[in-house]
Image (cartoon, grey):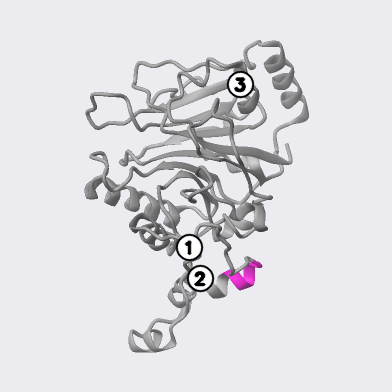
Amino acid sequence: MNSIKCASLNVCGLKRRVEFPDFYELVNKYDLFFVVETKLDANDVISLPNFKFINKPRKQPFIRKSGGLGIFIRDLLLPHCEILDCDSDFILWLKLSKLYCNTDQDVIFGVTYIPPLQSRFYTLDEFEAYENEIITKCSQYDKIFLCGDWNAQTSNLLDYSESDDFLNNHFQIDGDNAVFLNQEERMRSLGIPLTRLSADNKINNHGRSLIDTCKNNLIILNGRLGFDSAKMTFRNISTIDYVIISLDAFKHIEALNINTTDRLFSDGDALLEYNVKCRSSISTAVYSQCAKNSTAGKPIPKASLADEFSMNI
């Protein structure tokens, strides 16, 4: 595999979606398919051929099922994946082995759903736990890919920090600290466009919070890879769904596409699809056998299967 095909979607209730063959045809186009607002509980079982589903239901008590995160992982990737512990209801982490990707570090994927401010499931404690998760992972890993629904409108606010010579001199910030705080210069050196387009010209409080989150050496991918990636993501009235990546992950990204979905798949959110470039180190023989067994509906060879892999968070 020269690239990992990824997509994310707010499904607004997953159980009713998987009943349709068209939904499986959609998921089967990708290697990792991230879903938010799954509206599942810990007892719900979701099954699609050739995929394992990771379910992270909402921890907070609820009367009616709501929220929830999930990942469909193609069987071929499963032995190389690990679900990371997380203290926040708002994010689910997946680590893909550097040996599989043939990269110098493991690749980290995160799927996010931030409830609207007026929701009773949005609390400052939960949001702080989410922010701490982002800060921690950004300090531990260089290659991070986030996707999901932040309910955040950011228009074209700057999502990176700029150098301030006065503050640097006043607080005697220099060396690596100065470089870290100057995302603008790092972006120039990595060939990352500074300009970010957006068809949505509105800004809300979640949007300002998301911009602050990006100051941890993250950038919004929407609007940076051509005009099509700047399209609105919710009913053509707002942009609230994003793909957000670390600066060092930019060289691994291919085009971001924002596709309007049928009501069969979502209640109005667009499908965000992107490819992560890698050069798999898995042997041709193992890959061929896995692919053959997967196509035939047979189990993956025992030597390739991580039996201890948790299917329910």
Work out whether 160 lies above or below 178.
above
Mark seen at residue 183: 2
User: Along the polypeptide, which appears first: circle 2 or circle 3?
Assistant: 3
Q: Is residue 65 magenta?
A: no
- Type of the residue with mark 1: Asn
Secondary structure category for the residue under label 3: helix
Work out whether 175 lies above or below 130.
below
- Type of the residue with mark 2: Gln
- Type of the residue with mark 3: Tyr
Work out whether 45 lies above or below 276.
above
Q: In this view, does 307 lie to the left or right of 293?
A: left
Q: In this view, does 23 lie to the left or right of 254?
A: left
Mark seen at residue 57: none
Mark seen at residue 217: 1
Image location (x, y in percent) of residue 178: 45, 77
Q: Are marks 3 and 1 in contact (CB under 8 Å)?
A: no
Q: Are marks 2 and 3 in contact (CB under 8 Å)?
A: no
